[in-house]
Amino acid sequence: MIEFRFAIADLATTSFAYSPLQEAVFSLRCLHDPARYPHHRPWLRRIRPRLDALDHELLGALATPWLWVPDCLTPRPERARPTFADELDRLRTTPPELLDADFRAAYRTEKPVRARDSARVGSPARAEDSARVGSPARAGDSARAGSPASTGNPARAGASASTGSPARAGASARAGSPARAEDAARAGSPASTGSPARAGDSASTGNPASTATPATPTTTERTLPPVVARGLTDPAAFLTRIADALDAYWHTCLAPDWWPRAQSILEADLAHRGRVSAERGTGAMLSDLCHRLNWTGSHLRLSTRDFYTQAPWADTSIAGRGLVLLPSLFARGAQPLIDPARPPTLIYPARGSALLSEEAPPITDDALARLLGRPRARILDLLAEPASTTELARRLDVTPGAVSQHLAVLYDAGLLSRTRNGRVVRYARTRLGDELRRGDQ
């Protein structure tokens, strides 16, 4: 259980945003485990042939096999609706020295420890050489940019004090190196997350992490993918390569047809959260974000029972820093991303993600089509969630001008409402439109 503690002023600074860069990076999870994201399968089938022309070796390594992502690749949005270009520019200004710590945190590995610095039998290693058994790693060794310090791990089971034999050189206690999930489960202890933002969305076996009294876990050194290990020898050049690869991936696979629909779903989610907050209050809105969340009156509780690996902390005080709420089409549950130096962030599943795989409704000869005409009946059917003229035109495979004419008629008839956000106008069914649509079913 993780608790986000609010003061009265903290509720006033809680805000929503969405991040096209975050969605681009999170979409790489589909390459590792497409079965977990069924609504993205049509898009994934379309873009597979295009990946060969991209830096696919690097792109595949930006998400780990257990679906964690280095925190530095998804900087928190500075405004509610940033553009991909703006966020990519921010990524390019990331201090290169953060890459090593963040990639090692995501891949749950640390730099090797020399043999003479390893833990001795029956006594922990020196503080300056490695983390003491059961105590946190030094702040400088912990994963930066959103990942709390990992807990230290004792020497491997094969070199335990009970054997009476000295620990082998390769079995030293590594500062901040979390145990593998499968090793921790055997020991009866949840594995350390290494990167809390991804803890709730890692590859799952269907069983929650163990809550038994932690036993001494074993650990096996994890290795970075070769493309990452090579890149980290020159972090500045590696950062440039990452940004260039994401830029090409965005314009080749996401911007042409995926992002317009995804953005419409994210916008509809923000509009829905605003309506819930206005009609039922902030507490109901927060609890409604995800089944893992529960508002208690002063705390927002995030249940970790279905996390495959347990988070290494319990409570977080917002303390005037503001909580940023980010909907995502690639989150299967609410996920924390907490950096004490920046505003706390909570990623949650966007409402309506199933619309990504939706095809245009078939042309039918039902009563509503006879009443309104088939084009207007299809538009009314699609507007269960708000959408813009351009989005409707893409989904119906017609021109925006044709859609605009039909929308004007439906709006004048009181079947649709419209709201403006900057230069974008979004339409949604009114209560009359809902009743007319239900009466036809």
Image (cartoon, rainbow, N blue to C red):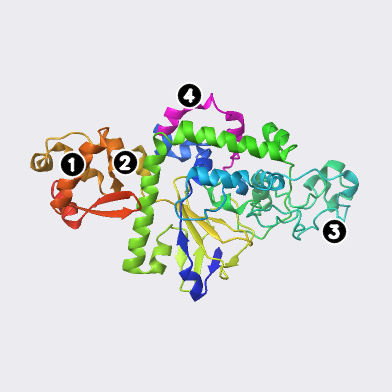
* Discs 4/1, front: 1
Q: Which mark, residue 102?
A: none
Measure the C-alpha gap from mark 1 to mark 2. 15 Å
Q: Nearer the viewer, mark 1 or mark 2?
A: 1
Identified by mark 3, the residue type is: Ala
Q: Which residue is mark 1?
A: 405
Outermost bottom residue: 8
Quadrant including the N terminus: bottom right
Helix, strand or loop for disc 2: helix
How many tags in the picture? 4
Mark 3: secondary structure: loop
Can residue 242 be spotted in the picture? yes
Circles 4 and 2 in contact, beta carbons < 8 Å: no
> In the drawing, what numbered circle is on residue 49?
4
- Going from N to C along the chain, the mark reached first, 4 or 2, is 4
Q: Secondary structure at mark 4?
A: helix
Please indicate, yes or no, whether residue 386 appears anywhere in the rendered image. Answer: no
> Foreground residue, 357 or 52?
52
Observer-nearest of 246 and 26: 246
Kind of residue indicated by mark 4: Pro
* Region in magenta: 43-67
